[in-house]
């Protein structure tokens, strides 16, 4: 693994009985890079994320995360549902399980980072969907991860809140220099947020699109259209081979 690589995925295959969920995936993800995984339903996005997280093992190939062997501890995952504990206030949700006296101060810093500094003593049922997701993001950052895995975290939010969350996540990832992998169904979200978009495919193993830096709305639209074109083409190929 070279110095700047954070995640190396080499010739990865994943079978579930006789179903091929992933076929020969090779990807090199650099430290600080923001990757979006998109593609047809069933294309293997969540499978790849689970393999990277170490929740499942590849059938063949290898995945290396970080520069040392203790790689799993540097990753945190965030899901569509916030998974907060309803009987604990926001601060306790973040500091739960730790006896370190600095933990609450760290939790408060992270709440400030996600713009919820004044909500430490609120309970989850007193928060909006977007606020709960911001708490979930702060909680994911409690152990100072280097890699953030996001499985459709904004899927349940309305369009305006979703847009605000996209900016907030980008801001947080940049400030914390996180390597981030986002699974999303929304090609525009991918085109807005990612440095690189990976379209998961079965006909070939994947298609890749590098996004321009400091992109404007027009460029986001062009990238989103191109990515959508790739997904539709894959859908057509699958229809013909079915
Ligand atoms: N635990 C499992 N057991 C058997 N098959 C599975 C399992 N997990 C995933 N699969 C299959 O692997 C393929 C890829 O699934 P995966 O959930 O990774 O796709 P996805 O791209 O994330 O889909 P979606 O966009 O619908 O969430 C699918 O055909 C799915 O049915």
Image (spheres, rainbow, N blue to C red):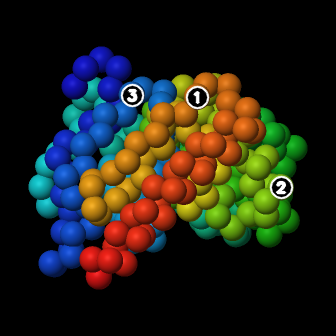
Apparent side of residue 102 relative to residue 27 in the rendered image (left or right): right
User: Crowdedness of circle 1 by 10 Å Cα count: few (<14), some, many (20+)?
Assistant: some
Residue 117: quadrant of the picture: top right
Kindly report the distance in space between the C-alpha atoms of the residues bearing marks 1 and 2: 24 Å
Provide residue 241's location: percent of width, then percent of height: 27, 77
Find numbered disc 2 in the image and state the secondary structure of the residue it sits on. helix
Horizontal side of residue 222 vs 27, given as left or right: right
Label 2 neighbourhood size at 10 Å, few (<14), some (14-19), many (20+)?
Answer: few
92 sits to left or right of 239: right
Q: Which quadrant, please, contains the N terminus?
A: top left
Work out whether residue 17 or residue 138 is closer to the camera in this orientation and state it.
17
**What residue lies at 63% left-to-right and 43% top-to-bottom?**
222
Q: Alpha carbon of mark 1 to alpha carbon of mark 3: how far? A: 16 Å
Q: Where is the C terminus found, in terms of image quarters?
A: bottom left
Which residue lies at the image location 33% right of the left edge and 43% below the top edge?
72
Of badges 1 and 3, the one in the foreground is 1
In the picture of the structure, the residue carrying the numbered disc 2 is 160
Per the image, label 1 sits on a secondary structure element best described as: loop
**Pointer 3: what residue?**
30
Marking on residue 101: none
Residue labelled with disc 1: 212
Mark positioned earlier in the residue sequence (1 or 2): 2
Label pair 1/3, CB-CB below 8 angstroms: no
Residue placed at 58% from the left, 43% from the top? 223
Q: Residues within 10 Å of mark 3 (few under 14, many from 20)?
A: some
Q: Distance of mark 2 from mark 3, alpha carbons?
A: 31 Å
**Secondary element type, mark 3:** strand
Mark closer to the chain start, 2 or 3:
3
Rendering coords of residue 196 (x, y %): 48, 37
- Residue 6 lies left or right of residue 94; in this view the side is left
Locate residue 96, reporting x and y percent. 59, 53
Residue most extreme to the bottom: 242
């Amino acid at each position: 693994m070279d110095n700047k690589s954070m995640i190396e995925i080499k010739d990865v295959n994943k079978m579930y009985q006789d179903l091929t969920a992933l076929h020969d995936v090779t990807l090199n993800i650099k430290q600080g890079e923001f990757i979006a995984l998109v593609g047809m339903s069933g294309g293997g996005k969540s499978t790849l994320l689970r393999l990277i997280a170490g929740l499942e093992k590849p059938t063949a190939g290898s995945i290396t995360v970080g520069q040392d062997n203790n790689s799993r501890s540097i990753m945190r995952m965030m899901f569509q549902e916030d998974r907060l504990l309803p009987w604990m206030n926001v601060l306790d949700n973040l500091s739960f399980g730790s006896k370190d006296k600095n933990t609450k101060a760290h939790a408060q810093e992270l709440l400030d980072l996600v713009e919820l500094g004044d909500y430490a003593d609120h309970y989850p049922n007193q928060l909006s969907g977007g606020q709960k997701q911001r708490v979930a993001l702060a909680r994911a950052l409690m152990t100072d991860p280097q890699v953030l895995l996001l499985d459709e975290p904004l899927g349940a939010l309305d369009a305006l809140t979703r847009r605000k969350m996209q900016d907030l996540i980008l801001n947080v990832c940049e400030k914390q220099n996180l390597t981030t992998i986002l699974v999303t169904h929304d090609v525009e979200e991918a085109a807005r947020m990612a440095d690189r978009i990976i379209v998961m495919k079965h006909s070939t193993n994947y298609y890749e699109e590098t996004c321009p830096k400091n992109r404007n709305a027009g460029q986001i639209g062009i990238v989103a259209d191109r990515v959508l074109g790739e997904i539709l083409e894959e859908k057509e190929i699958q229809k013909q081979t079915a």
